[in-house]
Each structure stands twice: as C-alpha cells, then as structure tokens.
C-alpha cells in the first residue's frame, strides 16, 4: 500500500505532512512521489493568498478523473482550505474527496483508514468543543471580546487552555513526525520543522489564519522534545520550531511556563542535534528572556524573524498590528544589542487597503534604514471573512501593488549585496543540506545560502567555508575544514 503527499504553503504545513506520513508509516504504507501509484493521496493546502488557494484547488480537480477510474483510492484534503470549522460547501464542491483534515490533525484520516468513526458520545464532546472554538474566532462576538482574541489595547490575554488533541508519545516512541516521504530519492532531510504552537489568536485585520487554524494552543514541552528526538534519530541535524507567533509559546499554560526560552533550553539538551531556529515572532512578544536564550545557547542560531508588515503608523493601525514604526525601530536596535550579528528577517505586505504612495514610501524608508537580512514580500490579497475584506476596499490597483513589490525587491537586492559583501574572505560554518548542480549547498547560522564544490560527501555535515564570492541571494566559497 502506498501514499502520496503533496504540500503547499508554510513550514507548518510541511511539518503537518510529516505527521500524516508518520501515521501512514506506522500502518505499513510506503511513500511514492506519483499520485497515480498511491492508494492514499493527501493534499495539504494553503489559502493565505489567493494564488496558493488557486494552485491547491487546481491540483485537487486534477485528481477527480483518477478517483473516478479508481474509486478505491482514498483522497484526503488537509490544511487551511479545510479549516477548523465544518465546511459543508467544501464537501459539496468536492464530492470525490473521502476525508477532510483540519490543519495539524491527521486524526480524521487515521479514523477513516482504521474504519472507525467517533462514537456519538465523542461527537457530542467534539461538537461542544468546536462551538466554543468558533465563538472565540468570531471576532465580533461577546465571547471573543470576553476571552478570545488578544486585546491590543493592553488588556491581559485570555486565560484559557484548549485541551491538547495530538498524540502524547509513549516511552520509546519518538516517531511523531516521519521524513520518509521526503527521502524518496535519497537520504532523509538534514533539516526539519516542528510546530510548537498551533493556531493564532491575534486578530490582524487581513489574515485568514485564525479562522482556518483555530485559536492559539501550545503543545506540551515533553511532546515537542520527543518529536525532535525522533527527527534526530532519522538523521535530522537542524530543527526550526514553528508558530504563527512562536514567541507566544506557553502563554496558554498556567503561569505562562514553560515558555519559549524554557523550550529552547530543553531542545538544546538533545544529543545529536546541532542547530535550532524558531519562527515567526511578532514584534510585540519578542522578550528579553527569548533574546537571552538565543545569546546563551550555542545551538540556537542567530536568526530572528519579526514581521513589520508596514512602515506607516496609520497602515499598521489599520492592520491592527499593535505597535508603531518607532517601536519596531527600537526593537531592532534592542535585538542587535542583545544578539550581535543576528540576522533579522521581516514580512511586508504592500498595497494594503488605503495605502497611499507616501505611506508606502515610509515602508521603503524603514527597510532602507534598518537593512534587514531578509524581507518576505507579499501583495495584499483580500481573504474571505477577514475584517479588511469585509470593511476596507481593496483600492490599490494590481499594477501599483506590483510596482511597490518590485521597488522593495530592488532595495533588498542592494541591501543584501552590501550585507553579504562584508563576508567576503571570512570563514563561516555551513550545515550542508544537499548537492545541487555539482556544488554542495548549505546554510550559515544566519541562514545565508552557501555553495561550494568538493569531491567528498558533505551531506549532513558541518563545514568551515571561506567565502570567495558574494551576491544578494547567495555566496560561494571553498572548504577550509570540517567543523
Ligand atoms: N508572526 C507573523 C506576524 O507577526 O505577522 C505571522 C505569520 S503570517 C501567518 C504569514 C505572512 O503571510 C504574514 O506575515 C503576511 O505578510 C502574509 N499574509 C497574511 N495574510 C495576507 C494577506 N491577506 N495578503 C497578503 N499577505 C498576507
């Protein structure tokens, strides 16, 4: 019996697919990269922007003839296209899909394959649980105002915890996430992603994620440590801990502990693991405890992802981000003081409703001034159900959005050429991931892509590489020694 997993979207989705793979591995299935050969086909989807949704839907329609020809194949649709709420319209639109999986939850597929279903009692409990969750997600509801979404006017956060639904590992069972489906044509991956906090309760006006991934809930520390241990046993050397707002890890636990700093220390203690990263942070929740952990724990890489989204205060307020551009500037200076040489990454949305050319220029100026190591750029895409799509006109024309995106892209090329140029002649530590067109490819601790040619097998090893060429997006070097 074979399975095929197709994944689009964020690193959280990649890790979720790994969890589905682990369940299928445990049931004796083997992975294949051909959907036509598979008995179980899983599409793990993303809807954060319209283009991603269109690709997922296109891929899904392409499976319809296969299912018609082979009705015994199981087609599973997973992720943000499905969401955490029941979606009868989706079921009606894609009748050839056998099972729908919310983000991060392989449970319905497991139940389908095992021929089981929830008992009516369990269904009752689930229905109650789901109703409570939906109340929280409805941002205008009194329930949400009382305990749900984070109040950006400085009120304390919600004091509630959602029971954890995932598997708690049995002693000795470290295989929560499988990498077998990723190693079909070679060895297992050197790096992997591990979700540590599911969902998001932050009500950014443009974002569909809280509606599709549910309210924020942190995974137990022991379970995360077990998952990382299992990945290390499979050959992984670097893990990236994931959350929509990763620095809020533990805030839903009693007393707010363990928090991200505690978790970093616990993961750091795992033998055989060499590097740890975490993303994405939110400017309002980056704390000194986290920065001190990054500075103190040698395996934690000097890379901080704090999305700013815009450089204009009115646009930031309309996005309901909860900080000003001046506060963001201060945060960047603070991070640089605490973690010297940290690579700082950001996200930007251009063409948010009402963004004028002058307001966009403030974003441009902010990036030019701060000289950050990476900017993930996106054109605003109205998403159904979000506050911005319901209450704000998508009034920046597509061509103007593209012009703004290109302008920031060109600026970043200049900034990165300058930043990377400073590394010329220096020796950096590279964790080698793969061979690519005769050259080995890996990343520095600050997540810069480095290529080098060498006859030896460097896969999964740390190399000291002297940089001989730099460009904005990558560097080339020569091996000096094994690290
Ligand atoms: N921690 C992050 C933060 O502070 O915003 C959250 C990560 S978010 C789920 C991923 C990125 O997708 C966002 O940073 C944003 O730039 C982009 N994004 C989300 N909704 C979008 C939309 N409607 N249009 C364009 N980009 C969007």
Image (cartoon, rainbow, N blue to C red):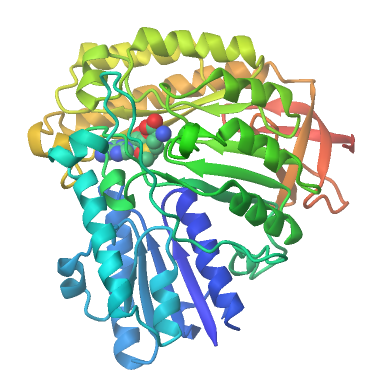
* 157 is higher (above) or lower (below) than 86: above
Q: Quadrant of residue 124?
A: bottom left
Q: Residue furthest right?
A: 481
Left or right relative to 87: residue 31: right
Q: 111 or 97, which is in the foreground?
A: 111
Could you tell me which residue is drawn at 13 percent across and 38 percent down? 142
Left or right relative to 104: residue 316: left
The image shows residue 29 at horizontal and vertical percentages of 57, 82
* 460 is higher (above) or lower (below) than 378: below
Q: Quadrant of residue 104?
A: bottom left
Left or right relative to 336: residue 164: left
Could you tell me which residue is drawn at 34 percent across and 30 percent down? 157
The image shows residue 443 at horizontal and vertical percentages of 68, 38
* 112 is higher (above) or lower (below) than 15: below
Q: Is residue 155 visible?
A: yes
Could you tell me which residue is drawn at 82 percent across and 50 percent down? 458
Where on the image, by quarter, is ligand 1? top left
Could you tell me which residue is drawn at 59 percent across and 46 percent down? 221
Q: Quadrant of the C terminus?
A: top right
The image shows residue 251 at horizontal and vertical percentages of 45, 34
Q: Quadrant of residue 230?
A: bottom right
Q: Is residue 62 visible?
A: no
Q: Quadrant of the N terminus?
A: bottom right
The image shows residue 115 at horizontal and vertical percentages of 41, 88
């Amino acid at each position: 019996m074979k399975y095929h997993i197709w994944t689009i979207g964020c690193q959280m989705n990649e890790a979720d697919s790994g969890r589905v793979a682990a369940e299928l591995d445990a049931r004796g299935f083997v992975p294949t990269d051909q959907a036509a050969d598979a008995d179980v086909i899983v599409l793990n989807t993303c809807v954060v922007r319209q283009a991603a949704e269109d690709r997922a839907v296109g891929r899904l329609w392409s499976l319809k003839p296969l299912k018609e020809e082979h009705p015994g194949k199981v087609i599973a649709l997973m992720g943000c296209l499905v969401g955490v709420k029941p979606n009868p319209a989706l079921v009606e639109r894609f009748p050839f899909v056998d099972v729908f999986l919310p983000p991060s939850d392989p449970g319905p597929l497991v139940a389908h394959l095992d021929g089981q279903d929830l008992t009516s009692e369990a269904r009752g409990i689930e229905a109650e649980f789901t109703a409570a969750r939906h109340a929280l997600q409805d941002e205008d509801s009194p329930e949400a105002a009382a305990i749900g979404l984070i109040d950006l006017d400085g009120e304390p956060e919600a004091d509630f915890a959602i029971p954890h639904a995932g598997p708690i590992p049995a002693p000795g069972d470290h295989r929560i996430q499988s990498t077998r489906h990723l190693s079909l044509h070679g060895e297992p991956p050197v790096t992997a992603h591990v979700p540590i906090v599911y969902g998001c309760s932050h009500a950014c006006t443009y974002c569909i994620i809280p509606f599709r991934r549910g309210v924020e809930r942190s995974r137990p520390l022991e379970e995360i440590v077990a998952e990382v241990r299992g990945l290390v046993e499979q050959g992984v050397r670097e893990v990236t801990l994931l959350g929509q707002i990763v620095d809020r890890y533990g805030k839903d636990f009693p007393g707010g502990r363990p928090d991200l700093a505690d978790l970093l220390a616990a993961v750091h203690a795992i033998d055989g693991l060499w590097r740890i990263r975490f993303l994405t942070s939110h400017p309002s929740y980056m704390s000194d405890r986290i920065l001190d952990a990054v500075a103190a724990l040698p395996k934690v890489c000097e890379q901080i992802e704090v999305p700013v989204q815009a450089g204009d205060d009115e646009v930031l307020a309309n996005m309901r981000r909860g900080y000003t551009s001046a506060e963001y500037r201060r945060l960047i200076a603070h991070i640089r003081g605490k973690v010297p040489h940290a690579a700082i990454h950001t996200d930007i949305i251009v063409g948010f409703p009402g963004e004028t050319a002058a307001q966009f220029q403030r974003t441009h100026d902010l990036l030019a001034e701060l000289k950050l190591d990476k900017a993930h750029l996106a054109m605003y895409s109205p998403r159904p159900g979000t506050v911005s799509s319901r209450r704000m006109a998508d009034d920046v024309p597509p061509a103007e959005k593209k012009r703004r995106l290109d302008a920031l892209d060109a600026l970043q090329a200049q900034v990165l050429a300058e930043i990377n140029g400073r590394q010329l002649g220096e020796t950096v530590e590279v964790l080698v991931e793969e061979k690519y067109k005769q050259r080995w490819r890996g990343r520095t601790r600050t997540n810069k892509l480095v290529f080098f040619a060498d006859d030896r097998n460097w896969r999964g090893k740390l190399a000291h590489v002297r940089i001989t060429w730099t460009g904005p997006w990558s560097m080339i070097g020569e091996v000096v020694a094994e690290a």
